[in-house]
Image (spheres, rainbow, N blue to C red):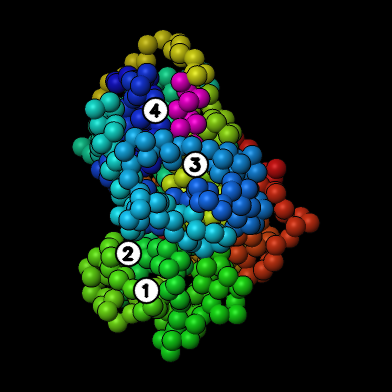
C-alpha cells in the first residue's frame, strides 16, 4: 500500500503540468505503464497554438477552433482554452521554456491547417513536444515521485468516492495506491488503429477504466485521422507534421498532380478530416500519395525530427517527395468532465486527451492539444489546491502487494484489433461495417465479463481495454447517423444540423444504453 495526496496516472504534458503545480503543496506520485518518456506529448511536432501575434486575438483563435470543431464544441471550454493559453505560456517561458525565436529574439510563429493566421509556437523546429516534456520533467524531478512500469487496473472506489488506483507491476504484483485525489491523464486511443501517429503504449486504458468505474463517456465517435504519416512498406512509421504544409509543401500523387487543388478553399491546409478523407479515396483507387517538399529551403534545418525519421526509414528527402498516408491521431471524445476537469466521481479528475471537456468539438484544431494539456493541467491542479477536501476512509484499507493467479482467455491479438478498427471504424464508416465491428468486439467482451481483472497479465489487460474501447467507439459511431468532423459515414455523408447539431452521444456502464444530451 502506498499513500500520497495526489496520484496521477500518465506522464504526458497534462500530467506533468498538474504535478508541477500541485507539488508546491502536495505529495504527488506519477505512475506510468511504461517509461516516463512514453507519451504522445513528447512526440508532438507542430507546436502550441496561442494568439500572441500582434495582429491576432483570442476571438480569432476561438472562431478557428469552433470552425474546425464543426460547432460541436463546448464554447465555454474553448473560451477558457484560448483566453488562458497565452497566460500559461508566458508562465512557462518565464520558467525557462525556450521556444524558437528569430535573430531579434521575436518568437517565430508557424502556420497550420484551419488557422487563419500564424500562431504556432514551436521549439527545436519540429521537436516541440520533446522540448516541452523534457523541460517539465526537469522541473518536477526533485519534487514528484515518478514510478515507471506500473499498469493501472482500476480505480479504488469507496462510498462513491475515488480513493486511489489498483496497479500491476511488470512482475505481476498487485498494489493499491491511495490518494485524496486521483488524476487520470492516460491520453487517447490511437493505438487501437493499425495506422497511427501515437506512441505504442496509447491503447485507450483510461477510457476503459472510466467505463468500468461507471464514469460518463462522451463523443467517442470523433477520432481525428492525421493526413500525413510517413508511409513505408505498407505501414505507417511516424508523423510528418502539418507544419510542413504550413511552410508550403503540397500533397501530390505519383504524377505530381496537386491532390487538394479544387477540393477545399484552404487546399492543403483544409481541416484534417477533409484532407485525410481525400487521401483515403486516392489510396483506395490504388494511387500513391506524397508530400512535395521541394519548395522548402533547408528542410532538414526546419524539420530535424522529420528528416531523422525519413533517414531511419530510408526515404531520400533530397528527391523532394515524402510518401504519406492518413492514420489515427487524436480522440476528441473521452471521459466527460466539467470545466475544472472533475469527472462524475468525486475525487477523480481527467485531463488531456483522455478527457472530454468538449473543447475540441468534432475535430481538434491543429496544435490545440499541447495547449489543452497546459491550460487544463493547471486548472485541475488549481481546483485541487483550492477546493479539495481531505477524504475520510471508512476503515483503513486492508491492502498490500499480492500476486493473483493468471487466467486463460481467448482474445484477439493487438494487430487483429488494430486491423478491425482501421477497416471498419476508420476514416470512412457505414452501418454494416460498424455493426460488424461492434458484434466482433461484443463476442470477445463476453470472455472477460465477470472475471477479476487483477488475475490478467499486463498484455491481457491491455487487450481487454482495447476491446472495450473499440466496442464503445463502434457503438457511438453507429448511433450518430450523420457525418461531422472526425466521424464520417458514407451512408449519411452530410452534417444533419436539424437532428444532431450540439447533440452528444453519452455512454455509461450503469445505463448501458446510449443517451443523447
Ligand atoms: C502536427 O504536427 O501535424 C500535429 C500537431 C497536432 O496534432 O496538433
Give the extent of the magenta segment.
Answer: 376-385
Residue of label 4:
21
Horizontal relation, residue 182 to residue 133: left or right: right
Place of residue 393 in the rendered image (x, y in percent of width and height, measured from the top left): 44, 12
Instruction: Describe the element under mark 4 as helix, strand or loop.
Output: helix
Give the CA distance from mark 4 to mark 1. Answer: 40 Å
Instruction: Describe the element under mark 1 as helix, strand or loop.
Output: loop
Give the CA distance from mark 4 to mark 2. Answer: 33 Å
* Residue at image point 46% right, 20% down: 385
Place of residue 50 in the rendered image (x, y in percent of width and height, measured from the top left): 50, 48
- Residue 443 seen by the camera: no
Residue of label 2:
302
Place of residue 62 in the rendered image (x, y in percent of width and height, measured from the top left): 61, 49
Query: Which quarter of the frame holds ligand 1?
Result: bottom left
Quadrant in which the N terminus is drawn: top left
Residue of label 3:
86
Closer to the eye: label 4 or 1: 1
Quadrant in which the C terminus is drawn: top right
Label located before the other in sequence (3 or 4): 4
Amino acid at each position: 500500500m502506498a499513500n500520497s495526496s495526489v496520484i496521477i496516472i500518465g506522464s504526458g504534458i497534462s500530467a506533468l503540468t498538474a504535478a508541477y503545480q500541485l507539488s508546491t503543496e502536495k505529495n504527488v506520485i506519477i505512475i506510468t505503464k511504461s517509461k516516463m518518456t512514453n507519451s504522445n506529448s513528447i512526440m508532438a511536432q507542430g507546436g502550441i497554438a496561442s494568439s500572441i501575434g500582434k495582429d491576432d486575438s483570442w476571438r480569432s483563435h476561438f472562431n478557428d477552433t469552433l470552425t474546425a470543431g464543426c460547432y460541436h464544441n463546448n464554447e465555454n471550454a474553448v473560451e477558457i482554452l484560448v483566453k488562458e493559453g497565452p497566460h500559461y505560456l508566458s508562465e512557462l517561458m518565464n520558467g525557462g521554456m525556450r521556444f524558437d525565436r528569430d535573430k531579434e529574439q521575436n518568437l517565430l510563429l508557424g502556420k497550420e491547417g484551419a488557422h487563419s493566421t500564424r500562431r504556432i509556437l514551436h521549439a527545436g523546429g519540429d521537436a516541440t513536444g520533446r522540448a516541452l516534456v523534457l523541460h517539465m520533467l526537469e522541473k518536477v524531478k526533485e519534487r514528484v515521485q515518478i514510478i515507471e512500469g506500473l499498469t493501472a487496473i482500476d480505480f479504488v472506489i469507496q462510498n462513491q468516492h475515488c480513493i486511489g488506483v489498483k496497479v500491476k507491476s511488470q512482475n505481476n504484483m498487485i498494489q493499491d495506491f491511495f490518494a485524496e485525489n486521483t488524476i487520470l491523464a492516460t491520453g487517447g486511443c490511437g493505438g487501437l488503429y493499425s495506422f497511427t501517429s501515437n506512441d505504442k503504449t496509447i491503447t485507450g486504458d483510461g477510457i476503459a477504466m472510466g467505463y468500468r468505474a461507471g464514469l460518463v463517456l462522451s463523443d467517442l465517435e470523433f477520432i481525428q485521422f492525421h493526413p500525413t504519416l510517413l508511409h513505408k512498406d505498407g505501414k505507417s512509421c511516424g508523423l510528418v507534421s502539418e507544419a510542413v504544409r504550413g511552410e508550403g509543401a503540397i500533397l501530390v500523387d505519383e504524377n505530381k498532380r496537386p491532390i487538394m487543388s479544387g477540393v477545399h478553399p484552404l487546399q492543403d491546409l483544409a481541416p484534417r478530416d477533409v484532407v485525410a478523407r481525400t487521401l483515403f479515396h486516392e489510396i483506395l483507387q490504388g494511387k500513391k500519395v506524397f508530400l512535395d517538399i521541394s519548395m522548402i529551403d533547408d528542410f532538414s534545418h526546419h524539420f530535424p525530427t522529420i528528416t531523422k525519421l525519413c533517414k531511419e526509414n530510408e526515404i531520400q528527402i533530397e528527391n523532394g517527395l515524402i510518401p504519406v498516408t492518413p492514420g489515427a491521431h487524436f480522440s476528441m471524445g473521452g471521459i466527460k468532465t466539467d470545466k475544472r476537469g472533475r469527472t462524475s466521481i468525486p475525487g477523480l479528475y481527467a485531463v488531456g486527451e483522455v478527457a472530454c471537456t468538449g473543447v475540441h468539438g468534432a475535430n481538434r484544431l491543429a496544435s490545440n492539444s499541447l495547449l489543452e494539456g497546459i491550460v487544463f493541467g493547471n486548472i485541475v491542479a488549481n481546483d485541487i489546491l483550492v477546493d479539495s477536501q481531505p477524504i475520510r476512509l471508512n476503515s483503513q484499507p486492508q491492502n498490500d502487494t499480492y500476486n493473483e493467479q493468471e487466467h486463460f482467455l481467448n482474445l484477439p491479438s493487438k494487430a487483429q484489433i488494430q486491423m478491425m478498427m482501421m477497416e471498419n471504424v476508420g476514416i470512412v464508416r457505414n452501418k454494416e461495417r460498424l455493426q460488424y465491428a461492434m458484434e466482433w468486439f461484443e463476442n470477445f467482451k463476453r470472455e472477460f465479463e465477470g472475471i477479476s481483472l487483477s488475475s490478467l497479465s499486463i498484455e491481457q489487460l491491455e487487450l481487454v481495454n482495447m476491446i472495450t474501447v473499440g466496442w464503445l467507439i463502434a457503438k457511438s459511431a453507429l448511433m450518430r447517423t450523420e457525418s461531422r468532423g472526425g466521424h464520417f459515414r458514407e451512408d449519411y455523408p452530410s452534417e444533419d444540423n436539424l437532428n444532431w447539431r450540439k447533440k452528444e452521444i453519452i455512454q455509461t456502464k450503469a445505463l448501458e444504453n446510449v443517451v443523447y444530451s
